[in-house]
Image (cartoon, rainbow, N blue to C red):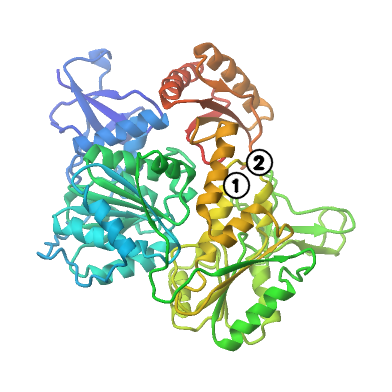
Amino acid sequence: MKIARVALDLPLDETFDFRIGEANPAPGALVVVPFGTRTKVGVVVGRAARSDVAPERLKEIARVIDDVPPFSEGDLALARFCARYYQRGLGEVLAASLPPRLRQVRRRALPPAETHPLAANGGFVRLHPLTPDQSAALGDVLGGFERFHPVLLQGVTGGGKTEVYLHLIAEALARGRQALLLVPEIALTPQLEQHVRSRFPEANLIAAHSHLAEGERARGWLAAQSGSAQVVLGTRLAILMPFAKLGLIVVDEEHDPSYKQQEGLRYSARDVAVRRAQQLGIPVVLGTATPSLESYENALLGRYGHRVLPFRAVAGAAMPEVRTIDSRADRPVEGLSHALTGALRARLERGEQSLVFINRRGFAPVLHCRPCGWHSTCKRCSANLVLHLRAGDLRCHHCGHRERAPARCPNCGSDDIAPVGHGTQRIEEALREALPGAAIARVDRDAASARGALKETFRKVREGEVDVLVGTQMLAKGHDYPNLTLVGVLEADSALFSADFRSAERLFALLVQVSGRAGRGDRPGEVLIQTDFPMHPLYAAVARHDYAQFAAEALEERRLAGFPPFAHLALLRAESKKAGEAAAFLRNAARVGRRLSDRVELFDPVAPPLERRAGFERSQLLVRARSRGALQPFLAEWRRALAARDDRRVRWSVDVDPQEV
């Protein structure tokens, strides 16, 4: 009897045996199999002559999905690595790599993928001249183009990293290979896609992100798998796609936390990119102005090549002057200090553009009743409901709950309720009052929710139809507007005193990124940071554009505290509908773990920053080890021991290399 081992989309280590019957699926093939009372799509990951399941209980494969070619052995090897490292089921990893359309048991047939033969010159039509620093970085990567060669490309904002990427993509195409360019945000994809297409008009370029229509995403996946797609531009999910002849991986803004998936298979696309390049023996370029401390330490130790672009690539463009505004002396009115408002008016008079950055969408963080102290909170989460004035509702940015904003206090009936704090909508209204006649555009997830809205806003900015942009992190990176000369930063102080050990690193990176939007053309740029702590060392490092000094101090703090990159972490997360059950589960898990190994350190369970979400009480337990060699075997054994207990009242998962602790 011929047996097929099939991996299914389940958070389990084991595979399931099925009789091959009339079907003859190759390893890596997608198959439809009966599972309980349903049918599921799975992937054949092996064969066997016999099974531990009794012959009469073995079910037969229903059919082979023949319009999707099998995963290659290299694809399966990458999936096995992700399953082992991130402590998830192999079938779950393979399912995560498939677009939703291809995971459906019953689906509409896809039209055959178009073929795009590549021109002899690689489809590259315009090579822009490089600066000496860019040329040196390009030469470094080209010198190791046929082997595993990780390079950290650290360049100031506006330093020309993208131009280096384009030259490398041209080289990959000229060698008949595919290139993968990863970006952290979907919002960055359309502008960069247009830029890359203009350089490679003869190449087949596809975008890969979750906002695409299901059919378009599936066709792109198949084009990458067949080799028809020469350039793939995508977010983190693109790193799991199959490629026929991948020859180059570029991870832009490698420091960005968006590369870490926060649900289900919690993988880091940046780290998987490095592993994939190692398996294939190809170069991987990690580009950023502010490297993650893990990547920077790897460069210092010589594990990664390290190239620096210290100057802006545009002739005459200099780094912006960064100053702080002491908001204790110049008290903001509706979020805007007198000095910032004056600077905005001066730019308007000169016909220049400005950006006001606040990392908080909505009108205000909370609706508050002065007489009784009531404030708008989510009934399902330990979080406030945010007022969205134009829609007239209160929203939870964690579970998605919405309700109408009350006209009176639900607690005491008073009509003396008012918004407290500032979000993008409220700052937009304040700017309209302070700058009458100015063309103001807001960019956040609410404003960008309508199809094409974000693209239209950026077109208006490029064509000078917008005077002031106000928005969130969506504006902080990847955008190049030569006429934008002023950046104002509001309410950055909260990150200075966060319990998260990565908060200072992230704030520094965010401020450098958003500051880098100013002065990218031939006009000088200025950055004004409103703060109650104008003498804080972090702001001083931002003003000096001194990443090296900031990183040296931050790494020493991490070394003393025993945090990455000098230790390796995992979080055991648990949640339950009943109060106290998640914490009790973790306390028992800690006792089990301490009996398994003395090479790892298990901390006591604590509540996460968001203790209650979507009606579930949550708790987490931190695990720390000095080496991956100690941590990974422990996690595998610990996870099996916990799974054997089968406590269905508590949902739990392991997060390896967590981004938030």
Task: Give the image location of residue 154, x and y in percent.
Answer: 41, 54
Q: Nearer the viewer, residue 626 or 259?
A: 626
Q: Secondary structure at mark 1?
A: helix
Give the farthest residue toward the right. Answer: 371
Q: Quadrant of the N terminus?
A: top left
Q: Nearer the viewer, residue 110 or 637?
A: 637
Reading the image, the residue beneath label 1 is 503
Q: Secondary structure at mark 2?
A: loop
In screen coordinates, is 94 left or right of 504? left
What type is the residue that disc 1 sits on?
Answer: Ser
Can see residue 32?
no
Task: Give the image location of residue 130, x and y in percent.
Answer: 29, 67
Task: Give the image location of residue 300, x and y in percent.
Answer: 42, 42
Circles 1 and 2: CB atoms closer than 8 Å: yes
Residue 51: image quadrant is: top left
What type is the residue that disc 2 sits on?
Answer: Ala
Reading the image, the residue beneath label 2 is 499
Task: Give the image location of residue 97, x and y in percent.
Answer: 32, 43
Q: Nearer the viewer, residue 484 or 546?
A: 546
In screen coordinates, is 304 left or right of 501? left
In screen coordinates, is 139 left or right of 308? left
Q: Nearer the viewer, residue 447 or 614?
A: 447
Can see residue 594?
yes
Residue at left offset 57%, top offset 19%? 589
Residue 586: image quadrant is: top right
Residue 574: image quadrant is: top right
Q: Is residue 264 above or below residue 406?
A: above
- Badge 1 crowding class, 10 Å Cα cut-off, few under 14, some 14 to 19, many 20 or more, is some
